[in-house]
Amino acid sequence: MNSRERVLKLFKKEAIDRVPCFSGMGNITETGINKLGYRFAGIHLDAKQMADTAATTYKLFGYECGVVPVDLCVEAEAMGCVINVYPHAEGILYPTIKEKLIHSEDEMNVSLPSDLASRGRVPLLKEAIRLLKADIGNEVAIGSYVLGPFTLAGQIMELNDLLKLSFKKADKVAKLLDVMADALIVVAKEYEKAGADYITVREMGATSDVLSPRVFKNLILPPLQKVIKSLSGHSVLHICGKTNDIVTSMMEAGPTAISVEQKNDVAESRKKLGGDALIFGNFDPYNVLVSGSEELVRSTIRKCIDDGVNAVWPGCDIWPTVPPQNMIAMMDEINRYGGKK
Amino acid sequence: MADETRKKEILDKLRNGVIQYDEDACREGAQEAIAEGLDANEAIFDGLVSGMEEVGRLFEAQEYFVPEILMCADALYAGLEILKPHCKQMDLGVKGSVVIGTVEGDVHDIGKNLVKMMFDVAGFTVYDLGRDVPLDKFVEEQLKTDSELVCLSAMMTTSMVGMPKVIEKIKEKNPNCMIMIGGAPTSKELADKWGADGYAEDASNALKEAIKMVAFLKKLRDEKAQKK
């Protein structure tokens, strides 16, 4: 059973030989970038460089997927925001939004551009997915991701205002989120057409560290559901932070699997959701994988499995400066321990 | 000078105005405090800040979430704007200036703004560099202003890793400068490892840490007043 078969069977809830180790979020490494002789700031703007880099995590370490994009600004840019890729940065800086689309409450009435699929870097991403699929698509599953409607809204307008308006003028926010959902559907469908086997929807801004479970259910869930239901392939819903209070709502959104980070008590979530639910997670990609020892990496992987995850999967993007020996230790531990349960 | 009952009424109005995110009540309470000769510092600490302390508690009890905190902060600022010109400079033996900002690569500033608010109420001079701030700018600004405190914020793991560089550069030039880091991905371990003096992992903790700091200043002020 190769990695591709293992991951796709997992999504279909068919029997597999061991727990896979992969991600639906960014997982490129500096080791990979350096090997190719690329610069981090350049790979966001070049389909071939993006695909080549994304393939190295599998090629170098056996990580069981290939995922593009690398940054979180594709959809906001297509909607009309201006991004900054920090072209002259020495180290690694991820692109951010430099110029928002909505500057005040009066401008919230945005509509969906009819040519969204050909705006910004959406065509570049489609090309990157095609290249990645042609390169390693027989060996691993190819993933891509979009933001969740609320997280996207927090990029195209001031998050500060969005949060307050979620409370004061929920109707207005709900309307905006619905447009965001439509935009995300357009983009995600393009990714699926280009060959993505699974799409992760990253609703990072809607964690229960920030919003109450009540607001989540009333305001965040409906547009999220809309996005996920429109996907024809496998889908994963990822939310950061404390999520134990909302895992049931996350499932209600209808994804094939949910993804949670280290602040989630997975054993507890498993009890709540039952044995059949697919839960991916939940190691700390920085404090364990980047700055932890090999032994910490190994024990954390074992704990994830013991707690009952269906796939060992990071709580966020893998930070590129991850030491190669920790990637090797992670994959070695998966091979040793992943079939024990 | 208003009598004790009236004073309590005004302080309660300020306190409850913050808790119930009622900007008008805070403005009204602040105007009454000035008109009736209340000490502006007292109105800030025993009214507005006391309300914010309760907001911190409500957040911890998960009755309030970030949207509520942001609205409470707006209410606090509405009162503070009126009271501030009437404040006497607190003599605490420190100059009381702070450089604060979100590090380059990160455009999130909610946690940073909450901490800034608590420095504002404490009467600090705040040099707010904003968000997405190039690392060297922190070092330059600290040197230029000779601030004894620098606060670095990051909400994304992807931007936090620039922090140790700033800490090292500042400590190299000015070993006595205190550095506080904050944001979801930070931890006590990282703060220790990078040589930072304090940390707060999220907006509520940042708020709590800043409240603690301000409460400490308040204690100093009270002790000073007692000695006199």
Image (spheres, coloured by chain):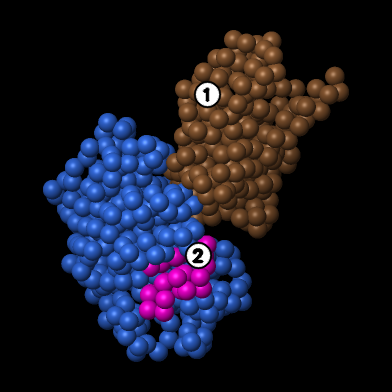
* A267 magenta-colored: yes
The answer to whether A107 is drawn above or below residue A147 in the figure is above
Q: Position of residue B120 (x, y in %)?
A: 59, 28
**Residue A19 versus residue B27: which sits nearer the camera?**
B27
Drawn side of residue A46 relative to residue A117, left or right: right
x and y percentages locating residue B4 in the rendered image: 70, 18
Which residue was labeled with disc 1?
Answer: B26
Residue A341 visible, this angle: yes
Amino acid type of the residue that numbered disc 2 sits on in the rendered structure? Asn
Q: Which residue is mark 2?
A: A264
Chain identifier of the brown chain: B
Element at badge 2?
loop
Residue B181 sits above or below residue A131 on the image: above
B98 vs B47, nearest the viewer = B47
Q: Residue at x 31, y 33 (%)?
A: A105
Q: Position of residue B198 (x, y in %)?
A: 67, 47
Residue A306 tag number: none
Circle 1 SS class: helix
Q: Which residues are magenta?
A: A258-281
The amino acid type of the residue labelled 1 equals Cys
Give the drawing colour for chain A. Answer: blue
Chain name for mark 2: A
Based on the picture, tell me whether residue B113 belongs to the magenta stretch.
no
Number of marks in the image?
2
